[in-house]
Image (cartoon, rainbow, N blue to C red):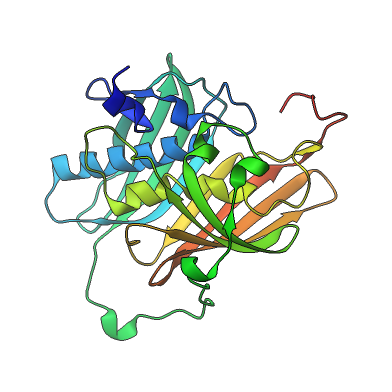
Amino acid sequence: MTSGADSAYFERLGATSFRATDHVGGAWDTATQHVAPALGLMVHAVEADLRSRRDDALVVGRLSFDILGTMPVDVVDIEVAVVRPGRTIELVEARLGHTGRDVVRLRAWLLRPGETSHLAGSAFAALPSPDQTPVWDGTSLWPGGFIGSVDVRRHLHEPGRGTYWVRSRVPLLAGEQVSPLAATAGLFDIANGMVVRADPQHVAFPNVDLTAHLFRAPAPGWVGFDTTVSFGAGGLGVTSTVLHDVDGPVGTMSQALTVRPVSAPSAPR
């Protein structure tokens, strides 16, 4: 491993292959990847594919990820295909796999941008700025290289409800420029673990998907989350979030959870 590669979440090995570093170590299981950086890498692949095909700058309106399983901290491959081509709207699919097995599938709607500044606005409440939000050490609750790679500022209002800001100290891809959206998307999946409803040593609640709808592109830097976690009585849950940057809200996000009480802290997660 080179020091440059080790300072990022991934190192490019080829046109479609990438090596994960220890910075992607998971929270439920440190031997597997936290899926958050991989989601950002998939967005980067979608944007690179778009630039290679056309020059009219469609923008991402929706990112919908299905998480099919776990993967070790190892080499992954990404393939991108256009599902629904169009002059002003496209649906693109990306598949991230490990040793020939799909682990994450992404479907992204790409839309033609336009001038609507006279209509811009949202009723979503503003967040206190990162400077107004207390520092919180996520490693006090979660293990793993990914959680150890980010700075967190958090207001916990009650279990399952809070607002927080997250910023990574690690670039997404070694030696390669990525967009603010790809870098931001590489933090989205942290939402399910920042304002937990239950102690993860006693209740597992991994998410099986993540869908983000965006009404503007995020600025680089801090990513803000206004999150509510809900558990039902039948083993299902939802983590719902309004996404922000330092200038205000940018979109919404949801994650479907499978809620599984465990008999002891050492039970498989």
- Judge from the rendering whether residue 147 lies leftward or rightward of residue 3; answer left or right: right
The image shows residue 147 at horizontal and vertical percentages of 54, 40
Q: Seen from this angle, which residue lies furthest bottom?
A: 118
Observer-nearest of 5 and 115: 5
Above or below 120: residue 85: above
Rendered residue at 76%/41% (across/down) = 259
Q: Seen from this angle, which residue lies furthest left?
A: 55
Above or below 147: residue 128: below
The image shows residue 216 at horizontal and vertical percentages of 35, 66
The image shows residue 149 at horizontal and vertical percentages of 47, 40
- Judge from the rendering whether residue 201 lies leftward or rightward of residue 15; answer left or right: right
Observer-nearest of 48 and 265: 265
Q: Seen from this angle, which residue lies furthest right?
A: 263
Above or below 148: residue 194: below
Q: How many marks?
A: 0
Q: In which quadrant of the rendered image does the N terminus lie? A: top left
In terms of image quadrants, where is residue 119?
bottom left
Rendered residue at 40%/81% (across/down) = 121
Q: Seen from this angle, which residue lies furthest top?
A: 99
Q: In which quadrant of the rendered image does the C terminus lie? A: top right
Rendered residue at 76%/52% (across/down) = 197
The image shows residue 17 at horizontal and vertical percentages of 30, 22
- Judge from the rendering whether residue 230 lies leftward or rightward of residue 19; answer left or right: right
